[in-house]
Amino acid sequence: MRNITKKAAERKFKLGMHSYTLHLSGLGESWGFQSEGRTYAFEKVIDLDKLMDMAVEEGIEVLHITLVDLDNDTSPEHLAAVKENAAKHGLDLELNVSFNAPSDPRVNATIEEALEIGHAIGATLVKFSTDVEHPHPISHACMCPEAMEQMSKIVMDFKKNIPTIEKYGMKIAIENHCDLFADEVIWMVEQLNHPLIGACCDTINSLMMAEGIADCVEKMAPYCYCVHFCDNRVFADPDGTHSLGCAIGDGDVDVIEVMKILREKAPEELDTIDLEIELPLSGYTLEDGRKEEIAAMRKSIKYMHEVLDIGIKGRK
């Protein structure tokens, strides 16, 4: 069990939520519904206005949203209205984009586009998934030539946009999004070497790269400007090894230890912990699944407030 200093133990974070937590309700993105060039998405039964209302009611202080949540409407009028509504609710916004999402192209944007959208909605941070493609076998692919070529191009693209990043003053976070090893994210952040650019550590994505969760968090914590805080049940059966999303505190991730690492090692730029849940897509009707998502969200918020001491305002 890790021992940390009293100062680190008392470190406070705002409680945020990735909208993907309610993906069965049409928020965030729809995973795995690409077929023959068409995107199949869950019907949106909760819009961004309603999500903001829910956030305030449930004690969430920051919403981590996607272009899907903006209805892919990037008109100045719409983005200004989103910014105004968030301010009325007392909510901070973070923007989540991908370069080439494998399942839902609605979340895709260039660096230039994302910076302009993020600024227009008053986002404090823009998080990027790079969608780097690694060759197989994955176990020896970290920093391989194929990945390095792609990452080098991405670094150059970010460098071209540093004047805009500085003008807007938004934090930038590069995620280990099922496609990057921790060392690769760190390499890009170090190459960019800019105080506004850091990492986003997703606490479950490392499993996709055959990396241990604690090892990944230990490595990435000193660079973290953003965290997707997840808990999953991990088990094996005759069909293989599985990782299924669940409420925070119900899974096999040592979330208490993860928070100790983050409190001790993350820079002051990390001021928010974004909960994220990805419940299984099967085992219930869509209507029941949506109810399960909201129940898991509420259970997670309660656990993060009461056990992990995350959240500054809105705690019940």
Image (tube, rainbow, N blue to C red):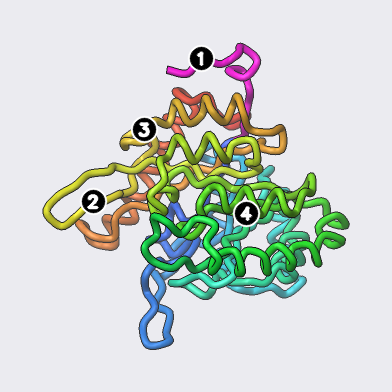
| Front-most of residues 16 and 59 | 16
The location of residue 117, given as percent across then percent down, is: 72, 66
Is 3 within the magenta?
yes
Query: Looking at the picture, which amino acid does disc 2 mark?
Result: Thr
Q: Secondary structure at mark 1?
A: loop
The residue singled out by tag 3 in the image is 249
Q: First in sequence, mark 3 or 2: give its number.
A: 2
- Tell me where the magenta segment starts and ends, as one range: 1-14
Q: Secondary structure at mark 3?
A: loop
Q: Is residue 106 left or right of residue 24?
A: right
Residue 174 is marked as 4
Sequence-first tag of 2 and 1: 1
Q: Is residue 96 magenta?
A: no
The residue lying toward the viewer, choosing from 2 and 276, is 2
Tag 4 near tag 3, CB within 8 Å: no
Query: From this viewpoint, which residue is outermost toward the left?
Result: 238
Considering every residue shown, the one lying at the far bottom of the view is 36
The residue depicted at 56 percent of the width and 48 percent of the height is 183
Q: CA distance from mark 4 to mark 1?
A: 29 Å
Say what amino acid the circle numbered 4 marks: Ile
Residue 3: mark: 1
**CA–CA distance in space, label 4 to label 3:** 26 Å
Residue name at image x 62 percent, y 59 percent: 128
